[in-house]
Amino acid sequence: MQILFKNIDMKGLANIDIYEKQGGYQSLKKAFAKKPEEVIEIVKVSGLRGRGGAGFPAGLKWSFLAKDVFPRYLACNADESEPGTCKDRELLEKNPHLLIEGIVATCYACQIETAYIYFRGEFQHASDLMDKAIEEAHKKGYLGKNIMGSGLDLDLYTHLGAGAYICGEESALLNSLEGRRGEPRLKPPFPAVEGLYGKPTVINNVETLCAVPWIVNEGGEKYAAIGTEKSKGTKLVSVSGHVKKPGNYEIVLGMPVREIIFDLAGGIRNDNRLKAFIPGGSSVPMLTADKVDVGYDYESLQEAGSMLGSGALIVMDHTVNVVEVTLRLAYFYMHESCGKCTPCREGTRWMWQILGKIQTGEGVGAQVDKLLDICDNMSFKCFCPLGDAAVGPVASSIKCFRSDYDELIKKLEGDKVAT
Amino acid sequence: MFVFTSEEKNKIEKIVGRYPVKQSALLPLLTLVQRRDGYVSPEAMEAIGKELELSPAYVQSVMSFYTMYHAQPTGKYIILFCHNISCQLNGADELLKYTAKKLGTDVGGTTTDKKFTLHQEECLAACCGGPMMRVNDTFYENLTREKIDQILDSLP
Protein backbone atom coordinates (compact mmCIF):
# COMPACT_ATOMS: atom_id res chain seq x y z
CA MET A 1 0.00 0.00 0.00
CA GLN A 2 1.73 3.17 -1.18
CA ILE A 3 0.13 6.49 -0.30
CA LEU A 4 3.06 8.71 0.60
CA PHE A 5 5.73 6.89 -1.38
CA LYS A 6 3.69 6.28 -4.53
CA ASN A 7 6.05 7.06 -7.44
CA ILE A 8 8.70 8.25 -4.96
CA ASP A 9 11.58 7.00 -7.10
CA MET A 10 10.15 8.22 -10.39
CA LYS A 11 12.68 10.35 -12.23
CA GLY A 12 11.75 14.02 -12.32
CA LEU A 13 8.86 13.75 -9.87
CA ALA A 14 9.96 17.06 -8.35
CA ASN A 15 9.04 18.70 -11.67
CA ILE A 16 5.46 20.00 -11.66
CA ASP A 17 4.56 18.71 -15.14
CA ILE A 18 5.54 15.16 -14.25
CA TYR A 19 3.82 15.46 -10.87
CA GLU A 20 0.60 16.63 -12.58
CA LYS A 21 0.74 13.72 -15.03
CA GLN A 22 0.63 11.36 -12.04
CA GLY A 23 -2.60 12.96 -10.89
CA GLY A 24 -0.92 15.66 -8.82
CA TYR A 25 -2.93 18.65 -7.56
CA GLN A 26 -6.22 16.87 -8.36
CA SER A 27 -7.25 16.85 -4.71
CA LEU A 28 -7.53 20.63 -4.80
CA LYS A 29 -10.49 20.49 -7.22
CA LYS A 30 -12.22 18.09 -4.84
CA ALA A 31 -11.43 20.20 -1.81
CA PHE A 32 -12.54 23.47 -3.40
CA ALA A 33 -15.89 21.90 -4.38
CA LYS A 34 -16.59 21.49 -0.66
CA LYS A 35 -16.93 23.91 2.21
CA PRO A 36 -13.77 24.33 4.33
CA GLU A 37 -15.39 22.69 7.36
CA GLU A 38 -16.34 19.68 5.21
CA VAL A 39 -12.68 19.19 4.35
CA ILE A 40 -11.80 19.25 8.06
CA GLU A 41 -14.51 16.65 8.62
CA ILE A 42 -13.02 14.35 5.96
CA VAL A 43 -9.64 14.49 7.68
CA LYS A 44 -11.29 13.89 11.06
CA VAL A 45 -13.07 10.83 9.70
CA SER A 46 -9.81 9.52 8.21
CA GLY A 47 -8.30 9.23 11.70
CA LEU A 48 -5.00 10.72 10.43
CA ARG A 49 -2.71 11.40 13.37
CA GLY A 50 0.26 13.73 13.58
CA ARG A 51 3.31 11.93 12.22
CA GLY A 52 5.91 14.14 13.88
CA GLY A 53 5.92 12.30 17.19
CA ALA A 54 2.94 13.23 19.33
CA GLY A 55 0.36 11.36 17.25
CA PHE A 56 -2.44 13.85 17.90
CA PRO A 57 -5.41 13.57 15.47
CA ALA A 58 -4.82 16.14 12.71
CA GLY A 59 -8.45 16.99 11.90
CA LEU A 60 -9.20 17.53 15.58
CA LYS A 61 -6.20 19.83 15.92
CA TRP A 62 -7.51 21.95 13.05
CA SER A 63 -10.97 22.17 14.58
CA PHE A 64 -9.45 23.77 17.72
CA LEU A 65 -8.53 26.94 15.79
CA ALA A 66 -9.95 30.00 17.54
CA LYS A 67 -13.25 30.81 15.84
CA ASP A 68 -13.43 33.89 13.65
CA VAL A 69 -9.94 35.09 14.50
CA PHE A 70 -7.91 36.07 11.44
CA PRO A 71 -5.33 36.06 10.02
CA ARG A 72 -4.37 32.49 10.76
CA TYR A 73 -1.07 30.85 9.90
CA LEU A 74 0.22 27.44 8.99
CA ALA A 75 3.71 26.31 9.96
CA CYS A 76 4.86 23.05 8.43
CA ASN A 77 7.40 21.34 10.65
CA ALA A 78 10.31 20.24 8.45
CA ASP A 79 12.81 20.42 11.32
CA GLU A 80 13.40 16.67 11.15
CA SER A 81 16.10 16.16 13.82
CA GLU A 82 15.04 13.19 15.93
CA PRO A 83 17.96 10.75 15.82
CA GLY A 84 17.05 7.83 13.59
CA THR A 85 14.49 9.76 11.56
CA CYS A 86 15.06 10.59 7.89
CA LYS A 87 11.68 10.10 6.21
CA ASP A 88 10.67 13.75 5.79
CA ARG A 89 13.91 14.54 3.97
CA GLU A 90 13.10 11.88 1.38
CA LEU A 91 9.61 13.31 0.84
CA LEU A 92 10.94 16.88 0.67
CA GLU A 93 13.73 16.15 -1.77
CA LYS A 94 11.91 13.72 -4.04
CA ASN A 95 8.29 14.88 -3.97
CA PRO A 96 8.04 18.56 -2.94
CA HIS A 97 4.77 19.12 -4.79
CA LEU A 98 2.98 16.51 -2.66
CA LEU A 99 3.70 18.68 0.38
CA ILE A 100 2.63 21.87 -1.42
CA GLU A 101 -0.62 20.19 -2.46
CA GLY A 102 -1.25 19.05 1.11
CA ILE A 103 -0.52 22.53 2.44
CA VAL A 104 -2.90 24.21 -0.03
CA ALA A 105 -5.72 21.78 0.85
CA THR A 106 -5.08 22.29 4.57
CA CYS A 107 -4.98 26.07 4.24
CA TYR A 108 -8.30 25.97 2.39
CA ALA A 109 -9.83 23.83 5.14
CA CYS A 110 -8.50 26.11 7.88
CA GLN A 111 -8.91 29.41 5.99
CA ILE A 112 -5.25 30.34 6.10
CA GLU A 113 -3.60 32.80 3.72
CA THR A 114 0.05 32.59 4.78
CA ALA A 115 2.05 29.42 5.33
CA TYR A 116 5.69 28.73 6.17
CA ILE A 117 7.74 25.57 5.87
CA TYR A 118 10.30 25.57 8.71
CA PHE A 119 13.33 23.57 7.57
CA ARG A 120 16.17 22.66 9.87
CA GLY A 121 19.19 24.71 8.86
CA GLU A 122 21.08 21.72 7.49
CA PHE A 123 18.32 21.18 4.89
CA GLN A 124 19.51 24.04 2.67
CA HIS A 125 19.45 21.71 -0.34
CA ALA A 126 15.88 20.56 0.31
CA SER A 127 14.82 24.15 0.96
CA ASP A 128 16.31 25.28 -2.38
CA LEU A 129 14.42 22.50 -4.17
CA MET A 130 11.23 23.56 -2.38
CA ASP A 131 11.72 27.20 -3.45
CA LYS A 132 11.86 26.00 -7.03
CA ALA A 133 8.72 23.89 -6.59
CA ILE A 134 6.89 26.82 -4.96
CA GLU A 135 7.79 29.00 -7.95
CA GLU A 136 6.41 26.35 -10.33
CA ALA A 137 3.21 26.06 -8.30
CA HIS A 138 2.77 29.85 -8.41
CA LYS A 139 3.13 29.86 -12.20
CA LYS A 140 0.48 27.17 -12.54
CA GLY A 141 -1.91 28.98 -10.23
CA TYR A 142 -1.80 26.50 -7.32
CA LEU A 143 -0.47 29.27 -5.09
CA GLY A 144 -1.14 33.00 -5.13
CA LYS A 145 -4.41 34.88 -5.58
CA ASN A 146 -7.78 33.16 -5.98
CA ILE A 147 -6.35 29.66 -6.47
CA MET A 148 -8.31 27.81 -9.18
CA GLY A 149 -11.21 30.23 -8.72
CA SER A 150 -11.77 29.03 -5.16
CA GLY A 151 -11.40 32.45 -3.59
CA LEU A 152 -8.40 31.19 -1.56
CA ASP A 153 -5.34 33.46 -1.58
CA LEU A 154 -2.25 31.69 -0.29
CA ASP A 155 1.41 32.60 -0.04
CA LEU A 156 3.86 29.88 0.92
CA TYR A 157 7.45 30.53 2.03
CA THR A 158 10.40 28.44 3.14
CA HIS A 159 12.22 29.40 6.34
CA LEU A 160 15.53 27.93 7.48
CA GLY A 161 16.48 27.30 11.09
CA ALA A 162 20.12 27.09 12.10
CA GLY A 163 20.86 23.96 14.08
CA ALA A 164 18.69 23.42 17.16
CA TYR A 165 16.83 20.16 17.83
CA ILE A 166 14.47 21.95 20.21
CA CYS A 167 12.97 23.91 17.29
CA GLY A 168 11.10 20.74 16.35
CA GLU A 169 8.97 21.37 19.45
CA GLU A 170 6.06 23.36 18.07
CA SER A 171 6.18 26.41 20.31
CA ALA A 172 9.98 26.67 20.03
CA LEU A 173 9.54 26.46 16.27
CA LEU A 174 7.19 29.45 16.41
CA ASN A 175 9.68 31.46 18.47
CA SER A 176 12.42 30.63 15.98
CA LEU A 177 10.16 31.65 13.10
CA GLU A 178 9.56 34.97 14.84
CA GLY A 179 13.32 35.61 15.00
CA ARG A 180 13.84 34.67 18.64
CA ARG A 181 15.90 32.10 20.52
CA GLY A 182 14.25 28.73 19.94
CA GLU A 183 12.96 28.24 23.46
CA PRO A 184 9.58 26.60 24.07
CA ARG A 185 6.57 28.59 25.21
CA LEU A 186 4.28 27.89 28.13
CA LYS A 187 1.09 26.06 27.12
CA PRO A 188 -1.76 26.89 27.21
CA PRO A 189 -2.47 28.91 25.18
CA PHE A 190 -1.96 26.30 22.48
CA PRO A 191 -0.89 27.41 19.01
CA ALA A 192 -4.40 26.81 17.62
CA VAL A 193 -5.53 29.71 19.79
CA GLU A 194 -2.39 31.87 20.08
CA GLY A 195 0.43 30.77 17.85
CA LEU A 196 2.58 32.60 15.34
CA TYR A 197 2.43 36.39 15.97
CA GLY A 198 -0.21 35.62 18.60
CA LYS A 199 -2.65 34.37 15.96
CA PRO A 200 -4.33 30.97 15.55
CA THR A 201 -1.79 28.63 13.95
CA VAL A 202 -1.82 25.14 12.51
CA ILE A 203 1.44 23.22 12.95
CA ASN A 204 1.84 19.87 11.26
CA ASN A 205 4.70 17.61 10.32
CA VAL A 206 5.69 17.12 6.65
CA GLU A 207 4.44 13.51 6.55
CA THR A 208 1.06 14.45 8.05
CA LEU A 209 0.42 17.13 5.44
CA CYS A 210 1.60 14.81 2.66
CA ALA A 211 -1.18 12.35 3.55
CA VAL A 212 -3.89 14.99 3.10
CA PRO A 213 -4.15 14.93 -0.75
CA TRP A 214 -4.85 11.17 -0.80
CA ILE A 215 -7.44 11.51 1.96
CA VAL A 216 -9.23 14.34 0.15
CA ASN A 217 -9.13 12.39 -3.14
CA GLU A 218 -10.23 9.03 -1.83
CA GLY A 219 -12.32 10.01 1.17
CA GLY A 220 -11.83 9.76 4.92
CA GLU A 221 -13.57 6.38 5.22
CA LYS A 222 -11.21 4.76 2.75
CA TYR A 223 -8.17 5.94 4.73
CA ALA A 224 -9.79 4.87 7.99
CA ALA A 225 -10.23 1.36 6.56
CA ILE A 226 -6.43 0.98 6.41
CA GLY A 227 -4.48 -0.04 9.51
CA THR A 228 -5.74 -1.03 12.95
CA GLU A 229 -8.81 0.06 14.86
CA LYS A 230 -7.18 3.13 16.36
CA SER A 231 -4.06 3.58 14.24
CA LYS A 232 -5.29 4.42 10.78
CA GLY A 233 -3.50 4.58 7.49
CA THR A 234 0.11 4.13 6.50
CA LYS A 235 3.32 5.32 8.16
CA LEU A 236 6.81 5.92 6.93
CA VAL A 237 9.34 4.02 9.01
CA SER A 238 13.05 4.85 8.87
CA VAL A 239 14.87 1.61 9.60
CA SER A 240 18.52 2.14 10.56
CA GLY A 241 21.31 0.56 12.56
CA HIS A 242 22.30 -3.07 12.24
CA VAL A 243 20.05 -4.16 9.38
CA LYS A 244 21.05 -5.38 5.95
CA LYS A 245 18.86 -2.99 4.01
CA PRO A 246 18.40 0.24 5.96
CA GLY A 247 15.89 2.62 4.42
CA ASN A 248 12.55 4.37 4.60
CA TYR A 249 9.62 2.00 4.19
CA GLU A 250 5.93 2.79 3.99
CA ILE A 251 3.96 0.31 6.05
CA VAL A 252 0.32 -0.21 6.93
CA LEU A 253 0.04 0.57 10.64
CA GLY A 254 -0.10 -2.62 12.67
CA MET A 255 2.54 -4.54 10.72
CA PRO A 256 4.61 -6.63 13.15
CA VAL A 257 8.06 -5.18 13.90
CA ARG A 258 9.50 -8.56 12.93
CA GLU A 259 8.27 -8.14 9.35
CA ILE A 260 9.72 -4.63 9.13
CA ILE A 261 13.14 -5.72 10.37
CA PHE A 262 13.41 -9.13 8.75
CA ASP A 263 11.36 -8.84 5.54
CA LEU A 264 11.55 -5.19 4.51
CA ALA A 265 14.98 -4.38 5.91
CA GLY A 266 16.50 -7.78 5.12
CA GLY A 267 17.28 -8.90 8.68
CA ILE A 268 20.25 -8.31 10.97
CA ARG A 269 23.71 -7.70 9.49
CA ASN A 270 25.97 -10.75 9.33
CA ASP A 271 22.91 -12.72 10.49
CA ASN A 272 23.71 -11.64 14.03
CA ARG A 273 21.22 -11.95 16.84
CA LEU A 274 18.77 -9.07 17.47
CA LYS A 275 19.42 -7.56 20.89
CA ALA A 276 17.31 -4.42 21.12
CA PHE A 277 15.36 -1.92 19.07
CA ILE A 278 14.16 1.61 19.55
CA PRO A 279 10.83 1.79 17.74
CA GLY A 280 10.13 5.50 17.39
CA GLY A 281 13.26 7.62 17.39
CA SER A 282 15.83 8.22 20.13
CA SER A 283 13.31 9.78 22.53
CA VAL A 284 11.24 6.66 23.12
CA PRO A 285 12.11 3.75 25.41
CA MET A 286 14.10 0.93 23.85
CA LEU A 287 12.66 -2.59 23.76
CA THR A 288 14.20 -6.05 24.06
CA ALA A 289 14.31 -8.58 21.22
CA ASP A 290 11.44 -10.63 22.66
CA LYS A 291 9.09 -7.75 21.78
CA VAL A 292 9.79 -8.16 18.07
CA ASP A 293 6.33 -9.55 17.32
CA VAL A 294 4.57 -6.43 18.54
CA GLY A 295 2.50 -4.58 15.94
CA TYR A 296 3.91 -1.31 14.67
CA ASP A 297 1.07 1.01 15.67
CA TYR A 298 0.46 3.63 18.36
CA GLU A 299 -1.43 1.42 20.81
CA SER A 300 0.55 -1.81 20.51
CA LEU A 301 3.90 -0.06 20.99
CA GLN A 302 2.57 1.80 23.99
CA GLU A 303 1.33 -1.44 25.48
CA ALA A 304 4.79 -2.91 24.95
CA GLY A 305 6.28 -0.08 26.99
CA SER A 306 7.41 2.31 24.29
CA MET A 307 5.99 4.68 21.68
CA LEU A 308 5.68 5.05 17.92
CA GLY A 309 7.16 8.56 18.06
CA SER A 310 8.45 9.80 14.73
CA GLY A 311 8.61 6.34 13.17
CA ALA A 312 12.34 5.68 13.41
CA LEU A 313 13.17 2.06 14.06
CA ILE A 314 16.77 1.78 15.27
CA VAL A 315 18.02 -1.80 15.36
CA MET A 316 20.88 -3.13 17.50
CA ASP A 317 22.49 -6.54 17.29
CA HIS A 318 24.06 -8.62 20.07
CA THR A 319 27.49 -7.00 19.73
CA VAL A 320 26.25 -3.75 21.25
CA ASN A 321 26.65 -2.75 24.88
CA VAL A 322 23.66 -0.47 25.36
CA VAL A 323 25.56 1.76 27.80
CA GLU A 324 27.67 3.03 24.92
CA VAL A 325 24.58 3.88 22.89
CA THR A 326 22.79 5.41 25.86
CA LEU A 327 25.82 7.57 26.63
CA ARG A 328 25.72 8.95 23.09
CA LEU A 329 22.03 9.74 23.34
CA ALA A 330 22.55 11.35 26.76
CA TYR A 331 25.21 13.56 25.17
CA PHE A 332 22.74 14.48 22.45
CA TYR A 333 20.03 15.64 24.87
CA MET A 334 22.56 17.56 26.95
CA HIS A 335 23.81 19.28 23.80
CA GLU A 336 20.29 20.10 22.62
CA SER A 337 18.72 21.14 25.93
CA CYS A 338 17.86 24.81 25.48
CA GLY A 339 18.72 25.58 29.10
CA LYS A 340 15.44 27.30 29.88
CA CYS A 341 14.37 25.01 32.73
CA THR A 342 16.54 23.62 35.50
CA PRO A 343 15.60 19.90 35.60
CA CYS A 344 16.40 19.49 31.90
CA ARG A 345 19.51 21.70 31.81
CA GLU A 346 21.07 20.13 34.90
CA GLY A 347 19.58 16.65 34.61
CA THR A 348 20.79 15.98 31.07
CA ARG A 349 24.36 17.02 31.98
CA TRP A 350 24.39 14.99 35.14
CA MET A 351 23.15 11.86 33.38
CA TRP A 352 25.79 12.27 30.69
CA GLN A 353 28.57 12.64 33.27
CA ILE A 354 27.52 9.54 35.22
CA LEU A 355 27.07 7.44 32.10
CA GLY A 356 30.52 8.53 30.94
CA LYS A 357 32.04 7.28 34.18
CA ILE A 358 30.27 3.95 33.89
CA GLN A 359 31.28 3.58 30.25
CA THR A 360 34.97 4.17 30.99
CA GLY A 361 34.92 1.69 33.87
CA GLU A 362 34.99 4.21 36.71
CA GLY A 363 31.41 3.57 37.75
CA VAL A 364 30.01 2.05 40.90
CA GLY A 365 26.71 0.25 41.30
CA ALA A 366 25.06 3.04 43.25
CA GLN A 367 25.43 5.33 40.24
CA VAL A 368 22.93 3.27 38.27
CA ASP A 369 20.37 3.93 40.99
CA LYS A 370 21.37 7.59 40.95
CA LEU A 371 20.58 7.66 37.23
CA LEU A 372 17.11 6.29 37.93
CA ASP A 373 16.67 8.91 40.63
CA ILE A 374 17.55 11.69 38.17
CA CYS A 375 15.10 10.18 35.66
CA ASP A 376 12.39 10.37 38.32
CA ASN A 377 13.23 13.97 39.04
CA MET A 378 12.98 14.91 35.37
CA SER A 379 9.92 12.93 34.25
CA PHE A 380 6.95 15.26 33.78
CA LYS A 381 8.83 18.00 35.61
CA CYS A 382 10.49 19.70 32.68
CA PHE A 383 9.12 22.69 30.82
CA CYS A 384 8.74 20.88 27.49
CA PRO A 385 8.88 17.29 26.18
CA LEU A 386 12.68 17.38 25.63
CA GLY A 387 13.27 16.47 29.27
CA ASP A 388 11.01 13.44 29.07
CA ALA A 389 12.66 12.48 25.80
CA ALA A 390 16.07 12.53 27.49
CA VAL A 391 14.79 10.18 30.18
CA GLY A 392 13.44 7.64 27.65
CA PRO A 393 16.67 5.95 26.57
CA VAL A 394 18.36 6.13 30.00
CA ALA A 395 15.50 4.69 32.06
CA SER A 396 14.65 2.00 29.51
CA SER A 397 18.26 0.90 29.01
CA ILE A 398 18.59 0.30 32.76
CA LYS A 399 15.24 -1.44 32.94
CA CYS A 400 15.89 -3.72 29.98
CA PHE A 401 19.66 -4.18 30.11
CA ARG A 402 20.82 -3.76 33.69
CA SER A 403 23.31 -6.56 33.04
CA ASP A 404 25.12 -4.37 30.49
CA TYR A 405 25.69 -1.83 33.25
CA ASP A 406 26.73 -4.49 35.76
CA GLU A 407 29.22 -5.88 33.27
CA LEU A 408 31.08 -2.56 33.09
CA ILE A 409 30.93 -2.01 36.83
CA LYS A 410 32.04 -5.53 37.70
CA LYS A 411 34.96 -5.09 35.38
CA LEU A 412 36.15 -2.24 37.59
CA GLU A 413 35.91 -4.32 40.74
CA GLY A 414 37.79 -7.11 39.00
CA ASP A 415 40.47 -4.67 37.83
CA LYS A 416 40.84 -3.37 41.35
CA VAL A 417 41.41 -6.84 42.66
CA ALA A 418 44.02 -7.47 39.96
CA THR A 419 46.02 -4.40 40.96
CA MET B 1 33.55 47.95 7.48
CA PHE B 2 30.58 45.72 6.76
CA VAL B 3 28.19 46.72 3.95
CA PHE B 4 25.39 45.03 2.09
CA THR B 5 25.61 45.31 -1.71
CA SER B 6 22.62 46.80 -3.54
CA GLU B 7 21.79 43.30 -4.79
CA GLU B 8 21.75 42.05 -1.21
CA LYS B 9 19.65 45.03 -0.15
CA ASN B 10 17.03 43.99 -2.73
CA LYS B 11 17.15 40.43 -1.49
CA ILE B 12 16.73 41.60 2.10
CA GLU B 13 13.70 43.66 1.13
CA LYS B 14 12.15 40.57 -0.46
CA ILE B 15 12.90 38.40 2.59
CA VAL B 16 11.48 40.95 5.03
CA GLY B 17 8.34 41.15 2.88
CA ARG B 18 7.51 37.51 3.64
CA TYR B 19 6.65 38.27 7.25
CA PRO B 20 4.18 40.59 9.00
CA VAL B 21 6.90 41.35 11.58
CA LYS B 22 10.41 42.41 10.51
CA GLN B 23 12.15 40.46 13.26
CA SER B 24 11.13 37.18 11.61
CA ALA B 25 13.78 37.87 8.99
CA LEU B 26 16.56 37.62 11.58
CA LEU B 27 17.55 33.99 10.96
CA PRO B 28 17.35 34.36 7.16
CA LEU B 29 19.61 37.44 7.29
CA LEU B 30 22.14 35.74 9.57
CA THR B 31 22.16 32.85 7.10
CA LEU B 32 22.63 35.25 4.19
CA VAL B 33 25.70 36.84 5.81
CA GLN B 34 27.17 33.55 6.92
CA ARG B 35 26.87 32.07 3.45
CA ARG B 36 28.70 35.09 2.02
CA ASP B 37 31.45 35.53 4.63
CA GLY B 38 31.61 32.14 6.34
CA TYR B 39 30.90 33.78 9.70
CA VAL B 40 28.99 36.69 11.25
CA SER B 41 31.22 39.49 12.55
CA PRO B 42 30.15 42.05 15.20
CA GLU B 43 29.92 44.64 12.40
CA ALA B 44 27.57 42.33 10.48
CA MET B 45 25.41 41.88 13.58
CA GLU B 46 25.12 45.64 13.81
CA ALA B 47 24.20 45.95 10.11
CA ILE B 48 21.55 43.22 10.42
CA GLY B 49 20.18 44.91 13.52
CA LYS B 50 19.88 48.17 11.61
CA GLU B 51 17.89 46.50 8.84
CA LEU B 52 15.47 44.89 11.28
CA GLU B 53 15.37 47.60 13.96
CA LEU B 54 17.00 45.34 16.55
CA SER B 55 19.92 46.09 18.85
CA PRO B 56 23.24 44.36 18.06
CA ALA B 57 23.08 42.75 21.51
CA TYR B 58 19.72 41.19 20.68
CA VAL B 59 21.02 39.92 17.35
CA GLN B 60 23.94 38.31 19.15
CA SER B 61 21.72 36.74 21.81
CA VAL B 62 19.61 35.04 19.16
CA MET B 63 22.60 34.09 17.03
CA SER B 64 24.42 32.44 19.93
CA PHE B 65 21.48 30.09 20.48
CA TYR B 66 21.94 28.36 17.11
CA THR B 67 24.91 26.10 16.46
CA MET B 68 25.15 26.74 12.73
CA TYR B 69 26.16 30.40 13.11
CA HIS B 70 29.82 31.14 13.63
CA ALA B 71 31.20 34.25 15.25
CA GLN B 72 34.73 33.42 14.04
CA PRO B 73 36.00 32.79 10.51
CA THR B 74 35.72 29.17 9.41
CA GLY B 75 37.33 27.04 6.74
CA LYS B 76 36.22 27.10 3.10
CA TYR B 77 34.47 23.79 3.67
CA ILE B 78 32.55 23.04 6.83
CA ILE B 79 32.38 19.31 7.51
CA LEU B 80 29.57 18.19 9.82
CA PHE B 81 30.34 14.61 10.75
CA CYS B 82 27.38 12.80 12.31
CA HIS B 83 28.17 10.75 15.41
CA ASN B 84 24.64 10.07 16.59
CA ILE B 85 23.15 6.65 17.20
CA SER B 86 22.49 5.25 13.70
CA CYS B 87 25.88 6.42 12.45
CA GLN B 88 27.59 5.37 15.70
CA LEU B 89 26.24 1.83 15.28
CA ASN B 90 27.82 1.73 11.85
CA GLY B 91 31.30 2.90 12.79
CA ALA B 92 31.12 6.71 12.73
CA ASP B 93 33.47 7.17 15.71
CA GLU B 94 36.38 5.46 14.02
CA LEU B 95 35.78 7.36 10.76
CA LEU B 96 35.55 10.72 12.54
CA LYS B 97 38.91 10.04 14.20
CA TYR B 98 40.31 9.03 10.82
CA THR B 99 39.05 12.25 9.23
CA ALA B 100 40.49 14.42 12.01
CA LYS B 101 43.87 12.69 11.64
CA LYS B 102 43.78 12.96 7.86
CA LEU B 103 43.10 16.69 8.03
CA GLY B 104 45.52 17.21 10.90
CA THR B 105 43.03 19.08 13.04
CA ASP B 106 41.05 18.48 16.20
CA VAL B 107 37.31 18.00 16.07
CA GLY B 108 35.93 21.54 16.18
CA GLY B 109 39.08 22.99 14.62
CA THR B 110 40.12 24.43 11.26
CA THR B 111 43.04 23.25 9.15
CA THR B 112 46.03 25.60 8.97
CA ASP B 113 45.39 26.27 5.28
CA LYS B 114 41.84 27.39 6.24
CA LYS B 115 40.36 24.86 3.85
CA PHE B 116 38.41 22.64 6.24
CA THR B 117 36.56 23.10 9.52
CA LEU B 118 35.62 19.79 11.12
CA HIS B 119 32.64 19.46 13.44
CA GLN B 120 31.14 16.47 15.19
CA GLU B 121 27.44 16.76 14.51
CA GLU B 122 24.21 15.54 16.01
CA CYS B 123 21.78 13.66 13.75
CA LEU B 124 21.46 15.09 10.22
CA ALA B 125 18.48 13.01 9.09
CA ALA B 126 20.39 10.62 6.88
CA CYS B 127 20.19 7.72 9.33
CA CYS B 128 19.58 5.05 6.70
CA GLY B 129 22.85 6.00 5.00
CA GLY B 130 25.10 6.12 8.05
CA PRO B 131 27.94 6.80 8.59
CA MET B 132 27.47 10.16 6.91
CA MET B 133 28.79 13.71 6.75
CA ARG B 134 27.68 17.00 5.28
CA VAL B 135 30.30 19.09 3.49
CA ASN B 136 28.87 22.58 3.03
CA ASP B 137 25.43 21.84 1.51
CA THR B 138 26.09 18.31 0.26
CA PHE B 139 25.28 15.09 2.13
CA TYR B 140 27.64 12.12 1.71
CA GLU B 141 26.33 8.76 2.94
CA ASN B 142 27.59 5.20 3.53
CA LEU B 143 31.09 6.48 4.23
CA THR B 144 34.25 4.40 4.31
CA ARG B 145 37.88 5.53 4.68
CA GLU B 146 38.32 5.26 0.92
CA LYS B 147 35.20 7.31 0.24
CA ILE B 148 36.25 10.02 2.68
CA ASP B 149 39.69 10.21 0.98
CA GLN B 150 38.08 10.46 -2.41
CA ILE B 151 35.57 13.18 -1.37
CA LEU B 152 37.95 15.39 0.57
CA ASP B 153 40.88 15.01 -1.86
CA SER B 154 38.73 16.02 -4.82
CA LEU B 155 37.50 19.30 -3.32
CA PRO B 156 39.21 22.30 -4.91
Image (tube, grey):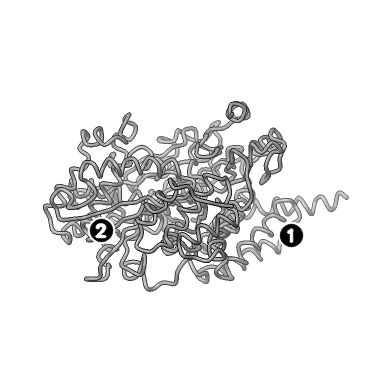
Residue A286 visible, this orientation: no
Residue at position x 18%, y 56% in the image:
A39
Where residue A50 appears, x then y in whole percent? Answer: 34, 56
Q: Secondary structure at mark 1?
A: loop
In this picture, is A365 found above or below A156? below
Front in this rendered view, residue A290 or A372: A372
Q: Residue furthest right?
A: A419
Front in this rendered view, residue A204 or A16: A16
B64 vs A134, left or right, is right
Where residue A239 appears, x then y in whole percent? Answer: 45, 41
Instruction: Give the residue at mark 1.
Output: A364
Residue at position x 28%, y 43% in the image:
A98
Number of marks drawn = 2
The kind of residue on which mark 2 rests is Glu
Residue at position x 48%, y 63% in the image:
A180
Instruction: Give the residue at mark 2.
Output: A113
